[in-house]
Image (cartoon, rainbow, N blue to C red):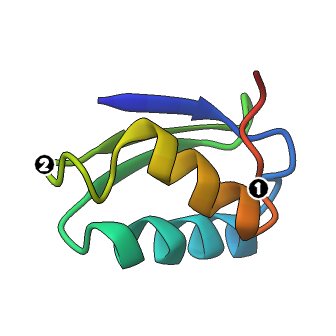
Amino acid sequence: MIEFKLPDMTCGHCVKAVTATVHKLDPQAGLEFDLSSRTVRIQTTASEAASPEALAAALSAEGYPPAP
């Protein structure tokens, strides 16, 4: 399980955008969102395509850079 804090994720539209971004790397990924804490937990089995670094880069490119 990979967890990111996404400070710019604030609404349902953001959830859809993050979901679509992650599913481009791993269509089978499972996602759990907590909008109140602005976190997403990602369950993926695609090790290289959906590595934490690849996911962070894709989310940043989509406008949802993970907090350090």
Residue appearing at x 52%, y 72% in the figure: 21
Residue at 69%, 68% in the rendered image: 12
Q: Quadrant of residue 38?
A: top right
Q: Position of residue 30 (x, y in %)?
A: 27, 54
Specify the amino acid type for callout 2. Thr
| Residue at numbered disc 1 | 64
Coordinates of residue 43 in the picture (x, y in percent): 26, 43
Q: Are marks 1 and 2 in contact (CB under 8 Å)?
A: no
Camera-side residue of 43 and 13:
43
**Residue 61, image x, y percentages:** 73, 66
**Residue located 77% across and 47% down the image:** 65
Amino acid type of the residue that numbered disc 1 sits on in the rendered structure: Tyr
Q: CA distance from mark 1 to mark 2?
A: 22 Å
Q: Earlier in the sequence, mark 1 or mark 2?
A: 2
Eyeballing the image, is 10 above or below 24?
A: above
Relative to residue 34, is residue 45 drawn left or right? Answer: left
